[in-house]
Structures are given as structure tokens and as C-alpha cells.
Image: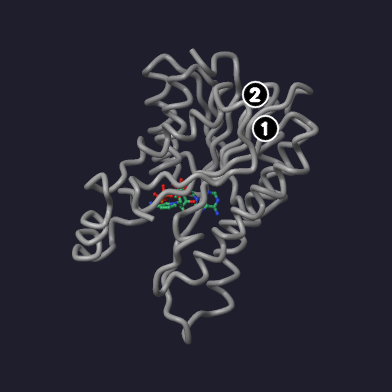
Amino acid sequence: MKLSGKVAIVTGGSRGIGAAIARRLAADGAQLALIYRSNGPAADATVQAIRAAGGEAEAFRADVADEAAVESAMRAVVARFGRVDALINNAGIFESEPVGRISRQSFQNQLLTNAWSVLASTQAALDHFPASGGAIVNVSSSLAVRPEPQTVSYSASKATVDSLTLGCAIELGARGIRVNAVAPAVTRTDMTAGLPADYLESETRLTPLGRLAEPQDIAGAVAFLCSDDARWITGRSILVDGGRV
Ligand SMILES: NC(=O)c1ccc[n+]([C@@H]2O[C@H](COP(=O)([O-])OP(=O)(O)OC[C@H]3O[C@@H](n4cnc5c(N)ncnc54)[C@H](OP(=O)(O)O)[C@@H]3O)[C@@H](O)[C@H]2O)c1
């Protein structure tokens, strides 16, 4: 198995894309630490699913926007698993507002939860990677490069994730740590469940592969970027969008 013997952390691993990533990395042989914000039952369900399939997993609670909480969770992860080989910065929130009504609070929430969290987790994990290095995969969005109406703050937060990905890759290459991002378009999770049906239909129509993404579609790309098959890829943000953009 491609990731056997590795320890992987997935933020936002309780639900949606993060849960699919956690399950996939575990199926590839990694031991999994899930970080979640508040949905304990969902985190437990993902941990149980991994264990039922023969894998090893544990959930840790932390708000990824709060660096002290992240550092404390990271210490707990290392006490349990010993080190970090892969960090998946997936946790995120989406708030939709039209220009003219965007509040400082909403802008700040999305910047802190979607972008500052990437730096906070990366910095907290840094000294726990082995000397041989490892992989960081950030979950960006197609909206980073193609914002849509009423997504200005969210899109800017994800463009920041892309820039952080490149910047961290340049700086951490010397430590053998590769840093990449995946950028999904609309993916069927709780985050998109409330979007209007006509929007989802038009997204499906405009996607060359003819459907919306399932979380597992994104997880496969993340597993590749974590694996040794991607050993010469760093600093990239890869659209995983069925051709939508
Ligand atoms: N779905 C899409 O169409 C889509 C498209 C492009 C990019 N993305 C990105 O993909 C990532 C996952 O999205 P999703 O659709 O799977 O979302 P989701 O179904 O809403 O799940 C969000 C996950 O993030 C966690 N989370 C949120 N805020 C957190 C915080 N402050 N601290 C710790 N954990 C936090 C949640 O934990 P709890 O369960 O504890 O609440 C949950 O595990 C996000 O970064 C999102 O921006 C999604």
C-alpha cells in the first residue's frame, strides 16, 4: 500500500471531502488523525468507518482558526502517533454575500478559517515531520481562479490558499516537504446541499464530464499528491473539477 507506515492528519475530517480523504488515505495504509470543529458524532462515524475497514484512526477537536487550539491538537496527535508524514489542510467554511453587503466579520471569518488555518496547521506540524520530509496538501477551490457572483470573500480566501501553497513550497522544499493544493469545483457535501437546484443543474451542464463531483473524486487526487508517485510535484494548485473551469 502506497502510504503504509505513514501518519496523516486531515483537518475537517469529520464530514464531506475531508472524511472521504481520511478514508482514502487510510485505505492506502496511513494512520489517520482527524481534526474537527464541533461535530463529534460525524467525526466518530468517520473514525469507526476507518477502523471497521481495518485501519487506524483517531479524532481530535480544534478550531483550525485558533492557532493555540491547533498547536494543542498537534501535540496530542504526535503523542498518539509519533510524527506527521502528511498534512491535509481541508477544513473550510463558505459564506455567500453580494458586494455592497460584505461584512468585515464574514470576510475575517473566511480568511481565518480557510487561509490562516493553513499556516497555523502547517507551522504547528512543521517540527513533527521526519528529516526525510513529507507532503502537505491544501484544499483550495476553483473559485480561487474563477470567482462567481456573491463569492468574493470565499474566493479571495482560496486565492490566498493558492499563494500560501506556492510560498510554503518554495520555503519548505529544502526540508523535503512538498506542498500542493487541490482545487475542486462544486462537490456534493453539506456545504453545497443548500444551493439552488437550478444552479446545480447548470453546473452539471457546464462540466465536461457531465456530473458534479463526489468527495471521493477529490480524495483520489489528494492521495496521489501524498504518495511517492508525486515526489517531483510541489507548489502546484491542481484543478480537480471534471473540466469545469
Ligand atoms: N463542497 C464543495 O463544493 C467545495 C468546492 C471547493 C472547495 N471546497 C473546500 O473543500 C473543503 C471541505 O469542504 P466540504 O464541502 O467537505 O465542507 P463541509 O461538508 O461543510 O465540511 C466542513 C468540514 O470542515 C470542518 N470545519 C469547518 N470549520 C472548521 C474549523 N473552524 N475548525 C475545524 N474544522 C472546521 C467541519 O467540522 P465539523 O464537522 O466539526 O463542523 C467539517 O469537517 C473546504 O475547504 C471547502 O472550502 C469545497
Image coords of residue 131 (percent x, y)? 79, 23
Give the residue drawn at x 31%, y 45%.
213
* In the image: residue 15, left or right of residue 33: left
**Mark 2 is on which residue type?**
Arg
Mark 1 vs 2: CB contact within 8 A: yes
The secondary element bearing badge 1 is classed as helix
Occupied quadrant, residue 203: bottom left
* In the image: residue 87, left or right of residue 21: right
Which residue is labeled 1 in the image?
76
Of residues 183 and 38, the one drawn nearer to the viewer in this rendering: 183
Give the residue drawn at x 57%, y 66%.
109
Occupied quadrant, residue 96: bottom left
Of residues 162 and 192, the one drawn nearer to the viewer in this rendering: 162
Image coords of residue 227 (percent x, y)? 55, 24
Q: Colour mode? A: one colour
Give the residue drawn at x 26%, y 57%.
206
Residue that sits furthest to the bottom in the current view: 100
